[in-house]
Amino acid sequence: MVEPTAPSRYAQRITARVRAADAARPWLWDGAVTLVWTVAALVDAAGGWRNVARDPSLPAGLVAVLSLALALPLYARRRRPTTVLAVMAAAAFASEVSGAFLQAGFLQVLPLFQLALTRPPRRLLWAFPALALPLLAGALRFDGEAWDAHVVPTLWAYAGVALLGITVRSRRDHTAALEDRARRLEIERDQEGRLAAAAERARIAREMHDIIGHNLSVITGLADGGRYAAARSPERAAQALEAIGTTSRQALGELRRLLGVLAVPDGAPGADRTPQPALADLAPLLEGVRKAGLPVAADLPDPLPALPPGAELTVYRVVQESLTNTLKHAGPGATATVRLTAAPDGTVVTVTDTGTPSGPPGRGRGLTGMRERAALYDGTLDCGPLPAGTGWRVRLHLPAARPNSPEESRP
């Protein structure tokens, strides 16, 4: 982009100040313009009008009145250009027919310009007949066969002024449209930024909930078991403490990985891109839950199905959250079953338990987070009590990703 030169910047600043002053006090500018042209018209009425008049013997009073009628209406030209042009056209008609041929008649270009600048173009359809009629009347009366020498050049001048007003208006409208578009784009950019930030906060909340909620539930189960085993079987208590340490270190590692990604900008060489949990990590997950005291039976295919990384993370988190809820709410003596089925139309994960729910579902963040994860991949998640009335079931269905579909590129 070419930077404006110093004279251009100076002219732009002066223009901006004049426009600001005009917008603040439009009456001052209108009064100044009207005063200047009224003085000029009266000076011409003092005697100069005779140089172009067809009838120099007209009374000076009539000439002065006509001059004022052609100059004073300019004060209202911006507010009522149509009315001002009609009044001035009537005065111009009297000037032409009487033979005064006052040069103040050319002041009609000012309301004509304002009309073309601020009013619909159809208003010009009647403006040109109103301007042409006085010229034709005076030319036919005094010039005879040479009438076109007086009419045609003047009409061309009026046409040029009208085109100038239309051009300025088009440029102003185009500039206003560009500014409006820029404002809209800025608003859309801010909205997209807020939506992206909200989506990222929701993703972080899901990850934090799954990591902290599950591991704390496992640690709680291990601690309760270790407390009961401490008096009777010190070896079992030691195993529980060891499992607590392992689970705590695993939770800290996942948290550091998540916080590390947040702390480093995207694309930076120091960003930690350690893979998120996948289907291969289901076995260690189930083993940790078993150590916490919940018997879990697994029905996993061998080999495990190949899914996009994001879909594998969704399956892992749903299984993790389901078993966490079983640990917290199913009660003592409950067991759980995890079943993973891969079919051509998609992947189905079912987690069931034999416990009795201790409260109404849907109060916490867990079920909402699972549904949000499923929705990211156009999947469905159904959860509720088993038909027999004892136990709970969570069923996740993820449809098969189409080739080159957006699901394959989601993180």
Image: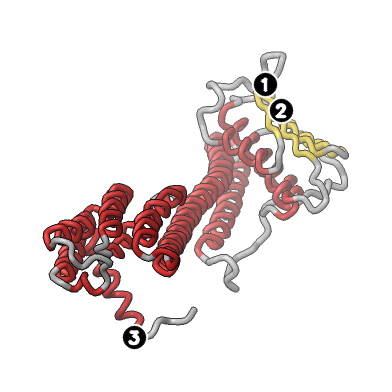
Coordinates of residue 88 in the picture (x, y in percent): 27, 54
Q: What residue is shown at x 66% (from left), y 26% (from top)?
A: 383
Residue type beneath disc 3: Ala
Residue 207 locus on image (x, y percent):
57, 48
Q: Residue furthest top?
A: 388
What distance separates the C-alpha of mark 1 from that of mark 2? 7 Å
- Which residue sits at x=27%, y=62%? 99
The residue nearer to you, when weighing 370 against 227, is 370
The C terminus: image quadrant: bottom right
Q: Secondary structure at mark 1?
A: loop
In the rendered image, which quarter is residue 139 located in? bottom left
Disc 2 on helix, strand or loop? strand
Q: CA distance from mark 3 to mark 1?
A: 81 Å
Circles 1 and 2, Cβ within 8 Å, touching? The answer is: yes
Instruction: Find the distance from the CA under tag 3 to the CA under tag 2.
Output: 77 Å
Identify the residue position indicated by label 1 in the image.
Answer: 391
Element type where label 3 sits in the image: helix
Say if 144 sits above or below 344 in the image: below
Q: Is residue 185 visible?
A: yes
What residue is pinned by disc 2?
Answer: 352
Q: What type is the residue that disc 2 sits on?
A: Thr
Front position in the image: 248 or 259: 259
Question: Would you say 165 lies left or right of 54 here?
Answer: right
Residue nearest the viewer, comparing 46 with 194: 46
The residue sitting at 61% across, 39% down in the picture is 372
Q: Which quadrant would residue 63 be assigned to in this image?
A: bottom left
First of labels 1, 2 by sequence position: 2
- The amino acid sitting under disc 1 is Gly
Q: Nearer the viewer, mark 3 or mark 2?
A: 3
Return the residue at label 3. 6
Q: Give the image location of residue 379, x and y in percent.
A: 71, 37
